[in-house]
């Protein structure tokens, strides 16, 4: 039976894999059995050669009727797994699922070589194991590391340094930047362009030279059509392990710490500091020169206009402690309900 997800026309697939290999990938526990699996699938459509998972009690009904051959669950849910499936136990179900899905569908490896249509600048240092796609443009003195993939029509500006095992998507452009290892730049991303910096004079705007770089540390992902401006005098920095969604704007001189997450359409103004493990919901924004403390959380569509302490949770515009926002919303709802029940002015009640 073919897996129900991961169309081989689009996704690299490995396997079949034994139950032991799946359990090892999940870093979980399961009784030893001689079973082979061909893929991964959701509970509702999985077959006996598929691995599935449950990480939300909302889908308990789907678990009870699933046709999956194995299901990754928390130990508390082991008794809910049907007898037709093997329960793979993990205290971190979603992480286990990510590792198992990667076992069956690893990232496509680089195909070493430079496409004949690519343009390679003078002094470029490209590791022989790297892949340079059709019509890519590699500037002078660029350095590209081992097994890195440069997609079709990507443009890498002069002097850029890209580490090992990176992926630069099609139509992306990278200039004035240094990238670490395992950095994934999605299609259409713009990195290293001039920031929004100018002086106001009686005659109009006077552009200020943007003399910094963009430094992207290891294991960072930048989503499709996002933009990261280079710094004006200091570098724009994105810390190791950070994830940036699609359509995000990072202005000049912003410093983002380790393992932060910025959802779609977030906008960060110049010289703002986002400390380690902070989270920003979709369409939220920060004024420049502010500090979002370590582990802070910003709700979707919020406007941050003052510093947020470590561990703080804020929402609304202007952003304030999320608990206060929820109280105000509850008060407003109660007030509106009471107003609807109140008789109109001047009308006699029965």
Image: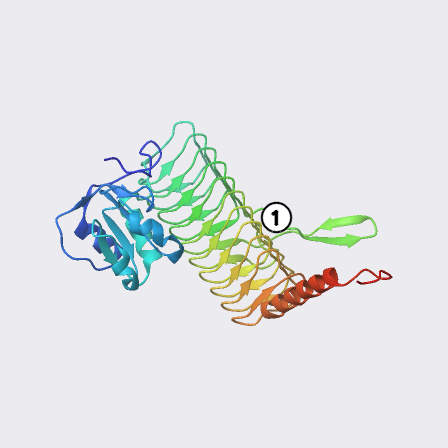
Between 123 and 145, which is closer to the camera in this rendering? 145
Q: Is residue 246 left or right of residue 113?
A: right
303 in relation to 143, above or below: below
Residue at label 1? 194
Residue located 38% across and 50% down the image: 182
**SS at circle 1:** loop
Residue located 22% across and 47% down the image:
69
Residue 323 in the figure: left or right of residue 11: right
Q: Position of residue 35 (x, y in %)?
A: 15, 47
Q: Residue furthest front?
A: 350
Q: Is residue 331 left or right of residue 20?
A: right
Q: Quadrant of the N terminus?
A: top left
Label 1: few (<14), some (14–19) or many (≥20) C-alpha neighbours in 10 Å: many
Above or below, comparing residue 283 to residue 321 in the picture: above
Q: Image height check: is 101 above or below 170? A: below
Give coordinates of residue 15: x percent, y percent.
21, 41
Q: Is residue 211 above or below residue 274?
A: above
Q: Quadrant of residue 259?
A: bottom left
Q: What residue is at 62 percent from the left and 52 percent from the top? A: 210
Total tally of numbered discs in the picture:
1
Q: Check the image and name the residue furthest to the top.
A: 117
On the rendered image, what quadrant is the C terminus found in? Answer: bottom right
Q: Is residue 81 left or right of residue 18?
A: right
Give residue 72's position: percent from left, percent from top. 28, 54
């Amino acid at each position: 039976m073919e897996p129900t997800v991961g169309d081989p026309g689009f996704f690299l697939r490995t396997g079949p894999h034994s139950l032991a290999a799946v359990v090892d990938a999940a870093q979980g526990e399961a009784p030893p059995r001689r079973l082979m699996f061909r893929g991964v699938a959701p509970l509702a459509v999985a077959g006996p050669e598929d691995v599935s998972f449950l990480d939300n009690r909302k889908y308990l009904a789907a678990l009870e009727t699933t046709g999956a051959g194995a299901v990754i669950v928390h130990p508390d849910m082991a008794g809910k797994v049907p007898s037709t499936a093997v329960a793979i136990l993990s205290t971190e179900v979603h992480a286990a699922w990510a590792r198992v899905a990667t076992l069956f569908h690893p990232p496509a490896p680089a195909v070493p070589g430079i496409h004949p249509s690519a343009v390679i600048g003078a002094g470029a240092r490209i590791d022989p194991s790297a892949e340079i796609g059709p019509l890519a443009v590699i500037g002078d003195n660029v350095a590209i590391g081992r097994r890195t993939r440069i997609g079709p029509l990507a443009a890498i500006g002069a002097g850029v340094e890209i580490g090992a095992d990176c992926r630069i998507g099609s139509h992306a452009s990278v200039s004035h930047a240094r990238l670490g290892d395992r950095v994934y730049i999605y299609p259409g991303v713009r990195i290293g362009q001039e920031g929004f910096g100018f002086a106001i004079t009686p005659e109009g705007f006077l552009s200020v030279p943007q003399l910094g770089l963009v430094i992207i540390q290891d294991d960072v992902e930048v989503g499709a059509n996002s933009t990261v401006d280079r710094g004006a005098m200091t570098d724009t920095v994105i810390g190791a392990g950070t994830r940036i969604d699609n359509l995000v704007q990072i202005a000049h001189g912003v410093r983002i710490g380790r393992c932060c997450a910025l959802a779609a359409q977030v906008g960060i103004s110049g010289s703002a500091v986002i400390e380690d493990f902070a989270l920003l919901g979709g369409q939220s924004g920060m004024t420049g020169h502010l500090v979002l403390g370590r582990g802070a959380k910003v709700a979707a569509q919020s406007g941050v206009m003052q510093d947020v302490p470590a561990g703080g949770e804020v929402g609304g515009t202007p952003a304030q402690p999320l608990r206060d926002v929820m109280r105000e919303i509850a008060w407003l709802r109660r007030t509106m309900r009471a107003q609807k029940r109140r008789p109109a002015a001047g009308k006699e009640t029965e």
